[in-house]
Image (cartoon, rainbow, N blue to C red):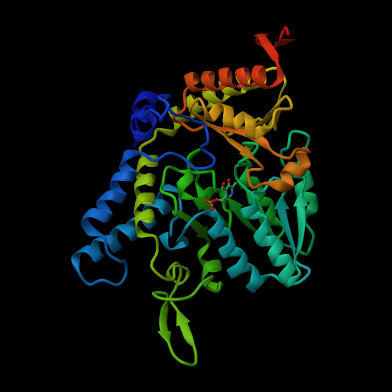
Amino acid sequence: MGHEFSIEKFRKQFPILSKPLRNGNPLVYLDNSATTQKPQSVIDKIVDFYSTYNSNVHRGMYEFSERATDEYEQARHNVAEYLGVNNPNEIIFVRGATEAINLVAYSYGRKFLTAGDEILIGAAEHHANYLPWQVLEQEIGVRRRIIPLNADYVIDIDQYEHLFSKRTKFVAIQHISNVLGTVNDIRTLSAIAHAHGAKILVDGACSLASEKINLGETDCDFFACSGHKGFGPTGSGFLFGKYDLLQDMVPYHVGGNIVNKVCFEKSSFKLPPTKFEAGTPDIAAVLGLGAAIDFLKEIDWKSARAYFSELVQYASGKIRSIPGIKVYGTSKNQSGVFSFNLDDIHAHDVATHLGSRGIAIRAGTHCAQPLMQILGVSGTARISLCLHNTKQEIDKAITALKDCLNIFTGKAITSIGSVQNRPS
Ligand SMILES: Cc1ncc(COP(=O)(O)O)c(C=O)c1O
């Protein structure tokens, strides 16, 4: 059971947030879509593992290894329980969403899709949920069809439904856009896919830190998740897959620990999830992910959501009121990600200027070049918020953005919403 959300208590759990940077500025971390910061409990778990029971899993017959194995499997139970998944064997540990999606494209796609089958793919996808399907198209001749966005850069459900044909076998779509912050209604998208007999993979890379998801309710067939964007360590992530599908899939990579029997002639593989976890896994990352799930469980999501939605509203108002700013995406269902361009200042200059003040944002294409094409830009600057952010931090970013505008364009901001040319 969680406690009422307290921002002070929450922030205290992240040691990095109280450490001044080299120039003395406190860190203002607004790059949470790239990776989230790690709470002390996650850091402690990793340190504890390496300093007291470091060993391999599923093979050692001694105390350390048994403990590591127990905790590794406990982490699987933890992920499953937190996400409303009844069978922990439907959770496969991988390095992140990229590996999870590649696993499905390889292990499901190459076995169950054939030339001419159609895959529907969102127009705002990250390259991780775009390239595996493009490669599949080149290799086996499946056809990709792009799900268009409406004027708010949100999926139009009617247009989505209209794309289905007898040939549609698969949908690959993100839960939360790392560029626009749009939150897709995956329950509805799944229901429509299933009504047309298609399977659906949801890219949930950015989901963990944003909300409490129940995969049982969303009913997607596959869910790819990055642990490091949900307070877990880098190198952690998981794929959820419905068990009957996982059972029929071929392993993505093969090697130690996943076989029942290996002979010169042929071999047989263990059941899921083991058959997808060949070799020594990143044990510390999995244990860290288990600790991150414990951390997430402690959050009272009702009050946390109330805090966060007020913060997002506040940020949205402040950011959009900066003269000369263009913010991309106006979805009502916003996760706290704002991509923008400031006048005609290069996004990298904006990010560098903020970086010099200890404010961490991202600039570039955000691994979503097809979306940049739709937006008609070469890149954007991006602020991505997380539960530990505060209005004061947003104010600092706004001040820095206004100063940036003054410095780069010579336009002095006299008051919110009005700009005058700086006197020469
Ligand atoms: C929407 C989205 N999908 C997939 C990925 C890939 O995740 P990872 O780098 O953890 O594999 C990212 C990472 O930025 C992302 O934002």
Is 85 left or right of 223, judged from the image as shown? left
Kindly indicate the quadrant of the structure image that contains residue 412: top right
Which residue is at a point 39% across and 50% down the rendered structure image? Answer: 289
Which residue is at a point 37% across and 27% down the rendered structure image? Answer: 4
Of the pair 163 and 16, the residue shown nearer to us: 16
- In the rendered image, the residue lying farthest to the left is 63
Q: Position of residue 10 (x, y in %)?
A: 37, 30
Is 234 left or right of 164, judged from the image as shown? left
Of the pair 340 and 92, the residue shown nearer to us: 340
Is 284 left or right of 157, judged from the image as shown? left
Of the pair 4 and 32, the residue shown nearer to us: 32
Of the pair 351 and 235, the residue shown nearer to us: 351
Q: Position of residue 349 (x, y in %)?
A: 63, 31
Is 335 left or right of 120, judged from the image as shown? left
Which residue is at a point 60% across and 45% down the rendered structure image? Answer: 175
Q: Position of residue 33 (x, y in %)?
A: 54, 40
Q: Position of residue 180 (x, y in %)?
A: 65, 36
Question: Does any portion of residue 177 appear in the rendered image?
Answer: yes
Kindly indicate the quadrant of the structure image that contains residue 402: top right
Q: Is residue 168 above or below residue 79?
A: below
Position of the C terminus, as image quadrant, is top right
Q: Is residue 51 above or below residue 260?
A: above
Position of the N terminus, as image quadrant, is top left
| Count of numbered marks | 0
Which residue is at a point 68% across and 22% down the rendered structure image? Answer: 408
- In the rendered image, the residue lying farthest to the front is 424
Question: Does any portion of residue 198 appear in the rendered image?
Answer: no
Kindly indicate the quadrant of the structure image that contains residue 50: bottom left
